[in-house]
Image: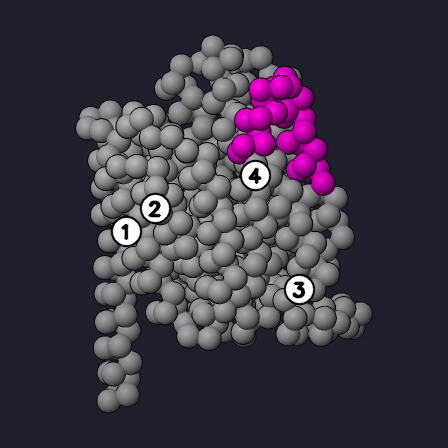
Amino acid sequence: MEDAQKQKTYEDQHSDKIWTRDFVLVCLANFFIFLGFQMTLPTIPLFVEELGGSDQLIGLIVGVFTFSALLLRPYAGHSLESKGRQFVYMLGLGIFVLAVGSFAFITSIIILFIMRVVQGVGWGFSTTATGTIATDIIPPHRRGEGLGYFGLSGNIALAFGPSLGLTLAGVISFQSLFLICAALGFIAFLLSTKIHYKKAEKSEEKTVPVKFDIFEKSAIQPSILLFFITVTFGGIATFLPLYTEEKGIGGIELYFLTFAIFLMISRTFAGKLYDKKGHIYVFLPGTLCILIAMILLSWLPSTFVMLIAAALYALGFGSVQPALQAWAVDKSPKNRKGMANATFFSFFDLGVGIGAIGFGQLAYLFNYASIYATAAGSVFLSMAFYVYLLIRSKRENKKSVNG
């Protein structure tokens, strides 16, 4: 009876408002963990280099993080429904903090590799959980808008984290830097203790238990669409600085700043558009922006064109990603929201990982420009698959009406 009363109070507090106390707390926690993560992103390769690692080892240590997070997401999704949101979230944050803090005391590349795997485990748990917690808090009819605002917390960290990490790496030791990153994660952990968590729901629909249950079937379509888009991430994050240097184009710092600004702008309107009109009004315009950005980057004659590409890419991705996440969660049964988020972020990780590794080989065999031309092809595949889904859906609706 008391649990039911608490649940009713929770639902009353989150009936229509997005900016509730719990939503602010989860956004702040997300900001601090992302800031700690983004500060390590450009500095881990420098640290590996200082330990005597080669370029191949740098790629391996950077990449293993993504795949360890990917492998843990299905288990995290199940645990969110069986063990609860708070347990999974705080466990993930705790593991992440301990792993990043351990970097400060590592002198061996082998130990660093192992702790990067552990960091990926913490990241997989915490990010799967926080997406589900935000979904719980946001009113269902404002989910696209709310997830857009929630995404801003990570975007702001993306805007300042990498440059802050590089700046600090130039003036303090790696030991101090990694302890600061761990402290930021610990702030997220403390904030997570103040959130009121929604209990996992039992679905009214009958769901058949599956022995090898590693994804949520209803989230597969938007997740596949996302995969073809996040493949482009590997090309930009890893190779754009090298590409601009090869072409003698300056202002790479401005690229990431422009990207962050326009990403934040997109979050203010794209979610509302999804909630009112649906994904059809968001996905194709957004992916068209990304496609044009990839074509411009494959050409890349000047800094100005690079910044135009940054703005278009940010507007496109900032519109498409929360819309696809909302689509994935909306379609899933009530007791499978955690698994839907796990499926969604697994495809996100898979796209980034495959893009980084595949484009590295492409750059070795051909040139940097070929990376972005291929990335444009990947975005086009996402658009083509979406059009196919639309046509199939219309045919099925027509059959059901006639039948």
Q: CB under 8 Å between callouts 3 and 1?
A: no
Reading the chain from its start, which is encountered first: label 4 or label 2? 4
Reading the chain from its start, which is encountered first: label 4 or label 1? 4
Q: CB under 8 Å between callouts 4 and 1?
A: no
User: Which of 176 and 76 lies nearest the eye of the viewer?
Assistant: 176
What's the residue at 24%, 71% (across, down)? 392
Instruction: Read off the residue under disc 2.
Output: 309
What's the residue at 33%, 51% (across, down)? 290
Q: Is residue 153 visible?
A: yes
Mark 3 or mark 4, which is nearer to you? 4
What's the residue at 67%, 49% (across, down)? 28
**From the viewer's perspective, is 143 left or right of 213?**
right
Secondary structure of the residue carrying numbered label 4? helix
Mark 2 residue type: Ala
| Rendered image quadrant of residue 241 | top left
Give the spatial CA distance, label 3 vs label 2: 32 Å
Instruction: Read off the residue under disc 4.
Output: 160
Give the spatial CA distance, label 4 vs label 2: 20 Å
Residue 117 location, x and y as percent? 51, 30
User: Which of 153 and 14 lies nearest the eye of the viewer?
Assistant: 153
Q: CB under 8 Å between callouts 2 and 1?
A: yes
Magenta: main secondary structure equals: helix
Query: Up-down: is 267 above or below 39?
Result: below
Reading the chain from its start, which is encountered first: label 2 or label 1? 1
**From the viewer's perspective, is 204 left or right of 53?**
right
Mark 4 neighbour density, 10 Å: few (under 14) some (14–19) many (20 or more): some
Write the start and end of the magenta stretch as one range.
162-187
Mark 1 residue type: Ile
